[in-house]
Amino acid sequence: MGWLNSRALLGGALVLATAGAQAQSLPDFTTVVEKNAPAVVHVEARTTGAHKKAKGGRAGQDDQEELLRRFFGMPGAPVQPPEQTSLGSGFIISADGYILTNDHVVDDADEVKIRLQDRRTFTARVVGKDPQYDIALLKVDASALPAVTIGDSRSVKRGQWALAIGSPFGLDATVTHGIISAVGRNLGSSDQPYTSFIQTDVPINRGNSGGPLFNLQGQVIGVNSQIYSTSGGYQGLSFSIPIDVAMNVVQQIKEKGYVSRGMLGVTVQPVDPFVKNLALPDSNGALVAQVTPGSGADKAGLKQGDVILSFNGTPVTQAPDLPPLVAITRPGSTARVEFLRDHKKQSVEVKVGELPRDKAALASAAQGEDGAGGGSAAALGLAVQDIDASTRSELGLKAGEGVVVSKVSGPAAANTGLRPGDVILMVNQKRVGSAAAFRDAARSIASGDTAMLLVRREDSTRFVGVTVPSDR
């Protein structure tokens, strides 16, 4: 009995010792907070217009709708009252009064007030902002202000500790912590296709937007920007803009007053549905669906059907990875693009262009090739027909290029969104210029296989996968 008691006491001591060792290994954020909290500011943006642009999904907005709705196809917020105040956070990046925050915190604001931790208040001037990256640069007339230390977001890894300081719900200098959950997270947003976020489980709520995300060394690695929530509150997912991207925006705003982005000249889409068609070993890469005539990609020889594997040495594991990599590349510079064509890896040097700054020009720059098909292909559930010379000329097609869809009869084709008037340029990477050629290509598709069609609709060209029914 005595031996058992001694053993139990020894076991208890070991448990306590282990717990003590684990406790000692946990990080202490005290130094980081004491050093950096004075440089984190409370932002109050007042809007006096008749109404404010509806922008759901931002962690700093002062509305009662679900956050991040725009990333998941939900409608925007309703028209706001004539006057409202948006609360957010920011941080001082230089002692002479430059402050970084989110664009959506100060968007449409008539007046922006900044409150420091020592309770001093300043009226801030919006030096410049960029909605695409959701970054705004502010300036206050002051000197000798406390400033943060800028880190390197490219060195961030999953599992590392992270710390946020901000003003959720107007509660200044609130500190929360967690770990990096993912890096290079693309949220599939049409508003922010050029941003790969740092994802964390750091608790972020309304009012944290624009605040800094720190590493254990007390360096800023991100700007807190988004959360995912079905209730309007924190639910375990928060997203930060990498500080490297944010500081690039700051530099461009200071130098030229606006932000330019690199443009490769391709439209890409996921490889996943066409792995079998392309005989790929995996689904990594970005499938080129369209090449802009005269662009750097076009001049370098990139073609529809190529699979881009890396950009300037950075792997492209999925289609959304490519736009942020290209966008942050300086226009006029040269980038190396590695791609797969006909089962062979190749690489080319591409001169990076500049992405048009207005949507109309962007749409014009995205123009690609069109096509149409003719005849009947019952296996695919499509009926196509030849294109006459005058129509080809109007569509800008070459002789013998493309067929037009005259009818969509099969559910598989209908489910892909194909419709009459679409122009089919290629079937399984073979160009088709007549109804007969389309039928011949369709016959070679086995039951249960997925046909890879290159389809043009208006000014957009993309690959569409149509699976042939197994009971054809």
Image (tube, rainbow, N blue to C red):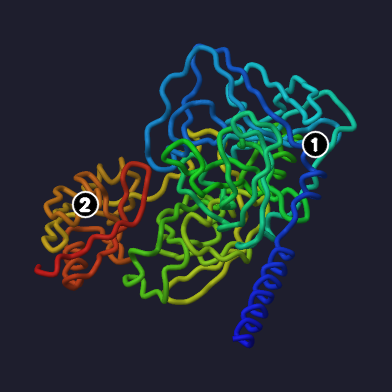
Q: Where is residue 167 drawn, in percent x and y?
A: 65, 33
Find disc 2 in the rendering and name its residue: 415
Q: Where is residue 241 drawn, in percent x and y?
A: 62, 46
The 10 Å Cα crowd at callout 2, few under 14, some 14 to 19, many 20 or more, is few
Q: Where is residue 448 drawn, in percent x and y?
A: 19, 70
Q: Which mark is residue 38?
A: 1
Give the side of residue 335 with respect to residue 471, left or right.
right
Q: Residue at x 70, y 29 (%)?
A: 42
Q: Nearer the viewer, residue 190 or 355?
A: 190
Q: Where is residue 420 drawn, in percent x and y?
A: 19, 45
Q: Residue at x 54, y 29 (%)?
A: 61
Q: Residue at x 47, y 71 (%)?
A: 340
Q: Residue furthest right?
A: 144
- Name the amino acid, label 1: Pro
Q: Quadrant of residue 134?
A: top right
* Mark 1 vs mark 2: in front: 1
Location of residue 19 with respect to 366 vertically, above or below: below
The 10 Å Cα crowd at callout 1, few under 14, some 14 to 19, many 20 or more, is some
Report if the CB atoms under discs 1 and 2 are less than 8 Å apart. no
Q: Residue furthest front?
A: 1
Viewport quadrant of the N terminus: bottom right
Marks 1 and 2, Cα distance to the nearest angstrom?
Answer: 56 Å
Location of residue 23 with respect to 6 vertically, above or below: above
